[in-house]
Image: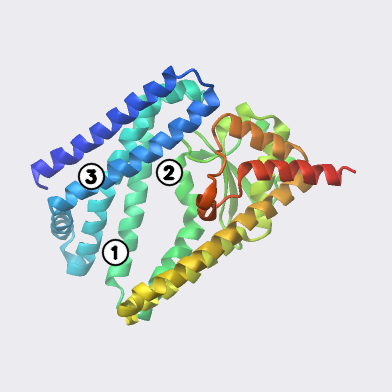
Amino acid sequence: MNPVAALATLAIAALTGLVVHLRARRYGADERGDPETAGNLRRLQRVGVVAGWLVGTAVGLGFDTPTTGTALVAGVAPWLGAAAAGAVGTGLALAVPAVLAALAARLGALPLQRTVERLTPTYGEVLRFELERATASVVGLSLAALVVAVVPDGWPRIGAAVALGAGATLGTPAWLVLTHRARRPTGAETAAVAAALPDSVSLLVVEGGPAGLSAVAAGVAPGPRYVFVDATLFALLGDAEVRAVVAHEVGHHRHGHVAARYALLVGAVVPLLAVAEFAPSLLVPVLPVVAVYGLGALVAVRRMELTADDHALANGGAALADSLETLLGLGYLRAAAGGPARLLAVHPPLIDRIERARSTDGQTGQ
């Protein structure tokens, strides 16, 4: 790799971390409560990652890093062929700035975040966590690019892309275990949520490093199905509230939402791939149709969240609203953006969900 390009990429990452750190210190100096500061920190990290990645990628493209990456891959694995080496090399050239930006933003915000979010990871733990997650992500994307590159054009390539997506959906639990250091629950944690967890769904607890999630459902039938929960929730929420969070995720499994979300994605991706393969001149006219479909798919996804809420209400009552309010107050969840941005949200507005939960629980209690 061009030494100047390498130094420029590292400099951009360092600058990203510095800007995030200085901005985080300003948040800490504000006379505002921890919940607002926690939300600001999370938003700051996201902005830092995106900005650092865009600038780093632009600089890399200016130094033609995709060509360098392709040559590197071809030298390490000459048996891949030109097309596969190009796909993997280009993917690496785009991924490296993202990895560095994510690491820099996380480390830059860490001093204040450890205080605000009541977390105690060290710099070494965060560095190891982010590198493990980045390595797993880069390897996975490189393998996906490799498979698509070596598969023949046309329907075989489209089928390979769909199969990769299905494999990613099935493999999400393993990916989360690897990238989020999930562990089996302790006896106390198991006892706290046992009433909401059926035998067909297993609980795993995210421990060590920034989880990036409060809870998530992963895995599809007939394979293993899991609910991943941030270990911090057991310290911040009461047993009934944690149970409601788990019941919400179990609701996603009960109603087949994990597979349904993948099916919605396939409905958008396959037509685009087909047009790109067989009629590329029609790609631009087709994009508005896919955009409309995407907005409809987001409506369906938001409806899934309400259905999962209903399952939690049936198993936890008012504790669901209590848990959402607590997580909102601590900055773990954010109120949805207003205006047109709400059309792109994957969750209904949090305040609406809380009010709906209160109302529904009141009706069932009459």
Question: How many angstroms separate mark 2 from mark 1 (CA)?
Answer: 21 Å
Q: Position of residue 20 (x, y in %)?
A: 34, 30
Query: Label 2: few (<14), some or many (≥20) within 10 Å?
Result: many
Q: Which mark is residue 179?
A: 2
Q: Position of residue 155 (x, y in %)?
A: 38, 80
Query: Upstream in the sequence, badge 1 or badge 3?
Result: 3
Left or right: 366, with 98 as reference point: right
Depicted 3 relative to depicted 23: above or below:
below
Q: Residue furthest left?
A: 3
Q: Is residue 98 left or right of residue 311?
A: left
The image quarter containing residue 221 is: bottom right
Q: CA distance from mark 3 to mark 2?
A: 24 Å
Callout 3 amino acid: Gly
Residue 314 to residue 291: above or below: above
Residue 175: give x, y in percent of width and height. 45, 50
- Which quarter of the rendered picture does the C terminus lie within? top right
Q: Position of residue 248 (x, y in %)?
A: 67, 47
Say left or right for 210 vs 222: left
Q: Which residue is mark 3?
A: 56
Any part of residue 283 in sight: yes
Determine which residue is flagged by label 1: 146
User: Label 1 is placed on what type of residue?
Assistant: Leu
